[in-house]
């Protein structure tokens, strides 16, 4: 998580870290709609995994819950793993170890092209 946060911050992102999926959901729900521009979600986390956290965010009923980009990070890159994160409501899948250029490009694409000014809720347990 610290490495991913540092790399993202070096590329202009503001990162808020969560130690597990439950905390990530709670932090998202505690912010005003639009408080985060994207969520980087590790698939394999303690307490609540990334797929369940994404499902809870998508189902919470907030105005921005269906639009906020959620990007999965995982070492698992088989087709069924990608399908599982997409079925959970995530918008993209990035394989670990993270390719920061690829991740920044995905963030830029999903966040409307200006990710260096966007706040990213980060969770990647590396």
Image (cartoon, helix red, strand yellow):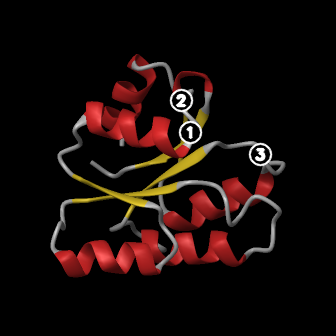
Q: Nearer the viewer, residue 118 or 114?
A: 114
10 Å neighbourhood of mark 1: few (<14), some, or many (≥20)?
many
Which residue is at a point 56% across and 39% down the rendered structure image?
Answer: 120
- Please state if 63 lies on the left or on the right of 16 as rendered: right
Q: Tag 1, which secondary structure?
A: strand
- Please state if 63 lies on the left or on the right of 23 as rendered: right
Residue 32: image location, x then y, percent: 84, 48
10 Å neighbourhood of mark 3: few (<14), some, or many (≥20)?
some
Residues marked 2 and 1 touching at CB (< 8 Å): yes
Q: Which residue is mark 1?
A: 120
- As measured in the structure, the alpha-carbon distance from the residue carrying label 2 to the one carrying label 3 is 14 Å
- As measured in the structure, the alpha-carbon distance from the residue carrying label 2 to the one carrying label 1 is 9 Å
Q: Tag 2, which secondary structure?
A: helix
Which residue is at a point 40% across and 69% down the rendered structure image?
Answer: 46
Q: Tag 3, which secondary structure?
A: loop
Q: Earlier in the sequence, mark 2 or mark 3?
A: 3
Q: Earlier in the sequence, mark 3 or mark 1?
A: 3
Q: Which residue is mark 2?
A: 115
- As measured in the structure, the alpha-carbon distance from the residue carrying label 3 to the one carrying label 1 is 11 Å
Q: Nearer the viewer, residue 70 or 14?
A: 70
Q: Nearer the viewer, residue 1 or 117?
A: 117
């Amino acid at each position: 998580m610290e490495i991913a946060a540092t790399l993202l911050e070096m590329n202009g992102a503001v990162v808020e870290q969560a130690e597990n999926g439950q905390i990530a959901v709670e932090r998202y729900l505690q912010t005003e709609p639009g408080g985060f521009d994207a969520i980087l979600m590790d698939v394999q986390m303690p307490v609540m995994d990334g797929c369940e956290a994404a499902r809870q965010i998508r189902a919470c009923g907030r105005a921005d819950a269906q639009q906020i980009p959620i990007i999965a990070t995982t070492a698992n890159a088989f087709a069924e793993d990608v399908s599982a994160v997409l079925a959970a409501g995530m918008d993209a899948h990035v394989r670990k170890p993270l390719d920061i250029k690829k991740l920044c490009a995905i963030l830029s694409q999903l966040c409307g092209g200006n990710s260096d000014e966007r706040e990213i809720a980060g969770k990647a347990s590396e």
